[in-house]
Image (tube, rainbow, N blue to C red):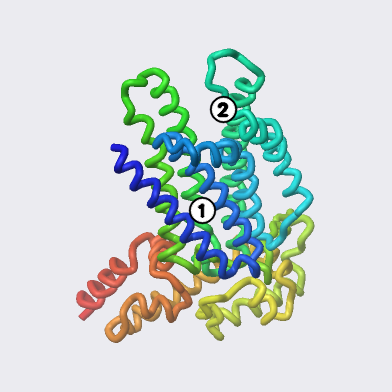
Amino acid sequence: MKDFSTFLTYSGISTIFFLMLLLTHTWKKREANKLLLNILLSFLFLFLTYASSYLNWNFLSTIVSPIGFIGPFVLGPLIFQYIKTIYTSNINRKSFIYSLLPFGIAFIFYSIPQYIFGLPIDEEITLLRIVSIVIPFLGILHLSYYLFLSNKLLKRFKKLVKNNYANLKKLDLKWLSIWIRGFIVFLIIDLVSGVLIVSYPIMPVFIYTNLFYLVLLIWYIGYFGIHQTQVFLVNEISQNPINDSANRSKSFFNCESEELLNLKTQLQIKFSEEKLFKEQDLSLKKTADILNVSDKKLSHLLNICMDSNFYEYVNTYRVSYFKEQLELGVAEKLTLLSIAFDSGFNSKATFNRVFKQQVGMTPIKFKKQLEKKSQSFH
């Protein structure tokens, strides 16, 4: 069992180092990647703390544990700020530094005494022992709070991003959303395994449970780092930061004004006649520039007057165009995926999901129904 755990440990360490090396190529240019690099570094200390404790690597444990046990104090704020930076292209440095104060306090009252005096090993209740128990526990609570905030923020931005972009493949941070939920599960597993280890010390298998789960989280983020580099190294949305200023009441926005009615007509012309939706990298800002209006005004028109958002509006045209092409028999010469890409979609998974949401069936099933209708007609 120990040999397997050693393999897991080296596998986790090598994966994190590889991802950090991958990030060093762009971290100077992208604020978000600087934060992601620090997230991985904090996660490495946390992982090494668990690994060295379970495998009795006393020398390594002496070095990393005083930092690893307070790592949750910095890991949570880093994840939260990373999400904000991706979607708003902005770092409020004063607020961010303030969020790291608990880590600084924990370092002074926990890490420094650990490096000087070491971990208390006797059973006597001392101030150092109380601090060594309370501060790591508070760190877990602190991380749990920030994971909750991060998950909530990610959901809000996922909704808002649809007001600005027609393709979300590089913007939805699905990998991070799953990773955050996975980390929440890890905290639960860690709590349960801790109780079981205390209750049943003769069952060493519990010692390796959370170590194995941490490696799974590392492998998961490693998959996106290796196989989906464009997602892992996502750039900030600097050209058009996400905001929710469009959420205003209709009473403050006259949808029947001549200006907005004319804008709506021009928008429909661009999409119906000029097929603007076929551009795969189409965004709200680009469309607004073509229409010579502000992106906020266009967003207001879509959200308030048309009860939609940019993502839904564009993809409705794309799905309609795809269906028209199938009805015209284009599928006899081209594959469904080729027609989908020609319609403006940039991902097979996104195309299938959007098509099923709007039509109620898969593209293949829709094609088969068209073929049956055509055969019965003839």
Relative to the observer, which residue lies in front, 151 or 79?
Answer: 79
Q: Is residue 378 above or below residue 301?
A: below
Q: Position of residue 66 (x, y in %)?
A: 59, 36
Question: Label 2 amino acid?
Answer: Leu
Relative to the observer, which residue lies in front, 322 or 16?
Answer: 16
User: Could you tell me which residue is drawn at 71 percent across and 43 percent down?
Assistant: 99
Q: Regarding mark 1 in the picture, which secondary structure is present there? A: helix
The quarter in which the N terminus is drawn is: top left
- Badge 2: residue crowd in 10 Å (few <14, some 14–19, many ≥20): some
User: Could you tell me which residue is drawn at 76 percent across and 48 percent down?
Assistant: 95
Q: Is residue 143 above or below residue 328?
A: above
The residues bearing labels 1 and 2 have C-alpha atoms spaced at a distance of 34 Å
- How many labels were placed on the picture? 2
Is any part of residue 21 visible from this angle? Answer: yes
User: Could you tell me which residue is drawn at 29 percent across and 69 percent down?
Assistant: 364
Q: Regarding mark 2 in the picture, which secondary structure is present there? A: loop
Choose the circle earlier in sequence order: 1 or 2.
2
Instruction: Provide the residue designation for mark 2.
Output: 119
Instruction: Provide the residue designation for mark 1.
Output: 176
Q: Position of residue 234 (x, y in %)?
A: 56, 65
Q: Position of residue 227 (x, y in %)?
A: 41, 65
The quarter in which the C terminus is drawn is: bottom left
